[in-house]
Amino acid sequence: MKDLIKDQYGLLYSSELLLSIIVLIFIIAIIANLNDGINEKMLSEEELSSLESIAIKSSDYLLNNPGNPENWEEDDGLDNGIVSKNIIPGLAIKNKNVENGEFFDESASDEMIMSNTISYNKLMKIKNNYDSLVDENLFNNSVHSSMAIYPLNSEIRPIEMGYDFGNEDDNVNDNDIVTVNRTVKCDFYSNFVVYDFNDFELFGESFEDGLCNHDSNPNLTNHVNNDESIWLCKNFRVYKKSLNDYNYYLISDESVKNTGTYCILESLNRTSENKKILNQEVIELNPFFLEDLENSSGEIYSIHFNVDKNRVNDFKTVLVAIPNNMSDVLISNGELNYDYFRVQDVTFILKVGYE
Ligand SMILES: [Zn+2]
């Protein structure tokens, strides 16, 4: 009888043990499964460092090379989605020098490339042909990628392009993506600036430009600086045929509204004393120019600004010439704005991940 009881206990023990073993196997199987799942999503150290290398090298390349062939962004095919296999896009600006928020032509050194710069025009061509230019030509379809610029100036919209890696916050695959951030300079539409009227560097501390026709004409009021205000006067020639290709605008920063700055706009044959208070951010000039060009192929115009001496830093006005076919796009995008005609600091972001 004692033995039987013993045996009963023994049986009980062994069935408990069996159950435990089964449960343990289940737990091990679940953990192993979970591990498999994690391994599928995580890259090996080798893969990750190769992805990092791709991201860093291609960022360096894009921001320090203008691309190949030279002036690739002017290829007509790019506007129609026809992309040559030979184009390797680069973003850097060539032959320019940055000064007072503008890039200037650098004629002395032909081979000069500005490192850590972005040509806005090139960036737009990449945005419109991303699959061909970047996925195929640059990365040979070996990775997914996306590019973006985030201007430090909040008046300018960010631009994003390429593969959608999803939202940063809920992206479970974040470990599979390598992101490169660089702060660089982007030219935006500064190439369209004909005159930057706040370029006092040109005249030195005296703000004198010495080229005003009002000073030499006894019938006109002298534009001589006094204690309260300074004059900034520019003469420039406009050809009738250029009005077919370009829209001219006087574009001011919002800050100019409070400065009491006024301007006088005239042609050499239509001199004027009419003061126009600068309280608009955009003034269209083509209609004014056309008044003198009915019977003439070209005319010399003058623009004279009178600026309060204490407010010169708030006087920010540029004369721009925008190709006709782009004007409507700029207007509808809200980009006919002073900030878009300055060189701006932007954060460039390149993301790459395996297919
Ligand atoms: Zn003047």
Image (cartoon, rainbow, N blue to C red):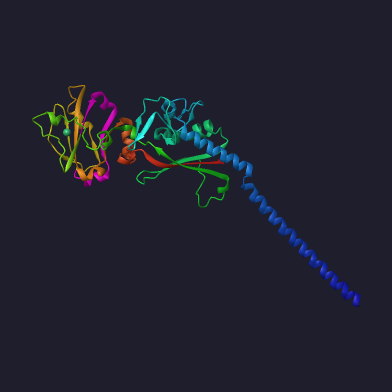
- Quadrant in the picture for the C terminus: top right
Residue 258: give x, y in percent of width and height.
22, 47
Whether 176 is drawn above or below 204: the answer is below
Q: Which residues are magenta?
A: 233-260
User: Which of the 4 image quadrants contains residue 336?
Assistant: top left
Between 15 and 90, which is closer to the camera in this rendering?
A: 90
**What's the residue at 17%, 27% (across, down)?**
292
For the N terminus, the image quarter is: bottom right
Is residue 354 something one can see in this rendering? no
- Relative horizontal placement of residue 77, taking residue 325 as reference (left or right): right
Q: Position of residue 255 (x, y in %)?
A: 26, 45
| Picture layout, residue 271 above or below residue 167 | above
Q: Say which residue appears at 55% left-offset and 44% top-offset.
A: 177
Q: Quadrant of ligand 1?
A: top left
> Residue 178: percent from the left, percent from the top?
54, 43
Q: Quarter-wise, where is residue 328 in the image?
A: top left
